[in-house]
Amino acid sequence: MFNALMVEKDADGKTSAAIQQIDIARLPAGDVIVDIEYSTVNYKDGLCIGPGGGLVRNYPHIPGIDFAGTVASSDDPRYSPGDKVVLTGWRVGEAHWGGYSQKARVKADWLVPLPKGIDTRHAMAVGTAGFTAMLAVMALEDHGIKDGPVLVTGAAGGVGSVATAILAQLGHEVAAVTGRPETADYLTSLGATQIVAREEINETTKRPLEAETWGGCVDAVGSAMLARVLGQMKYGASVAAVGLAGGADLPATVIPFLLRGVNLLGIDSVMQPYENRLRAWERIAKDLPMEKLEAMIVPAVLSDLPALGRDILKGQIKGRAVVDVNG
């Protein structure tokens, strides 16, 4: 038996979440059983735990869209007991039981060996959000980051925090956008050289093009903010768009793409090929300073959920809430 946060739905469609003891025989099918050590709290997790269940595909359900831990047993020759592994994506925590549990059984193809230089706790301080941030940075590099500051929107959140730290470590000037002035010191500690108030970017304008300002952008917000940023990019610069916190609409024109050659790069972390996932985690272990990662961590245990799920939906979590599932 092991502990897990189980979300259930009653006949009236109301959901409830509570820590339960689960028999290992109830775990979904898979090749590898993992003793989970840490998970984290992402925006999707907040939706899955919240009223109505959000993205959950089946009940009862264990949320948690990522986890890191140690292989307990494996039917796949690629993994052996004792191996440290990390999992992000593949609808874990939505369609397949996830990381808010002391054990998980998953397909071997979903896992990645944890690279040297990063432990399971720091891996979940990175989590899906930080993994997505690295994918975004890699995409900007592949298309060429231009001279000048790189803009990071939603900078105090999970994706933005890690993107800020990585870009700064790589030697780029980072302009961090935040709607919370109290996070300025935090973002500066991660390496941001400029703090931009969200209102400055969200200011209404009818001009499709503005002064060429940013050499690249990691956008974790979308919608009106993304539309405004497109018109401020330098010629040939790229925007890696990773989130829909501001909504799915894009009230923009084609002019930034036609007259400035701006590249809009969509980043999807859910079903990345194994080679991309491994490359991203190796880059994280190499390029993300552990002391900056440590500064992002908000420690948590299973009993802190679902309150943390509500907090992240309200934008009240600064950095990365790391859940010690055995704490």
Image (cartoon, grey):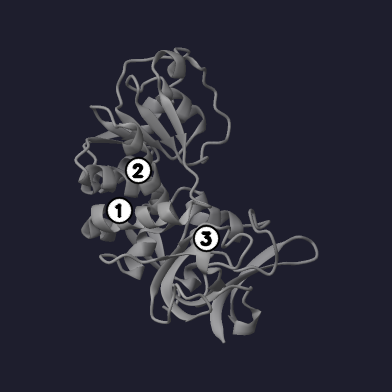
What quarter of the picture does the N terminus occupy?
Answer: bottom right
Please give the name of the residue rendered at 24% of the width and 48% of the height, measured from the top-left corner. Answer: 190
Instruction: Name the disc covering residue 3, or none.
Output: none
Picture coordinates of residue 248 (x, y %)? 57, 35
Give amino acid for label 1: Arg
- The reply to whether dot 2 and dot 3 touch (C-beta < 8 Å) is no
Give amino acid for label 2: Met
Q: Of the residues under marks 1 and 2, which one precedes in the sequence?
A: 2
Q: Write down the residue under mark 1.
A: 283
- The reply to whether dot 1 and dot 3 touch (C-beta < 8 Å) is no
Tell me if mark 2 has few (under 14), some (14-19) or many (20+) residues whose alpha carbon lies within 10 angstroms of its own: some
Picture coordinates of residue 293 (x, y %)? 28, 57
Q: Of the residues under marks 2 and 3, which one precedes in the sequence?
A: 3
Q: Write down the residue under mark 2.
A: 138
Q: In the rendered image, which quarter is residue 48 located in?
A: bottom right
- The reply to whether dot 1 and dot 2 touch (C-beta < 8 Å) is yes
Q: Nearer the viewer, residue 94 or 180?
A: 94
Tell me if mark 1 has few (under 14), some (14-19) or many (20+) residues whose alpha carbon lies within 10 angstroms of its own: some
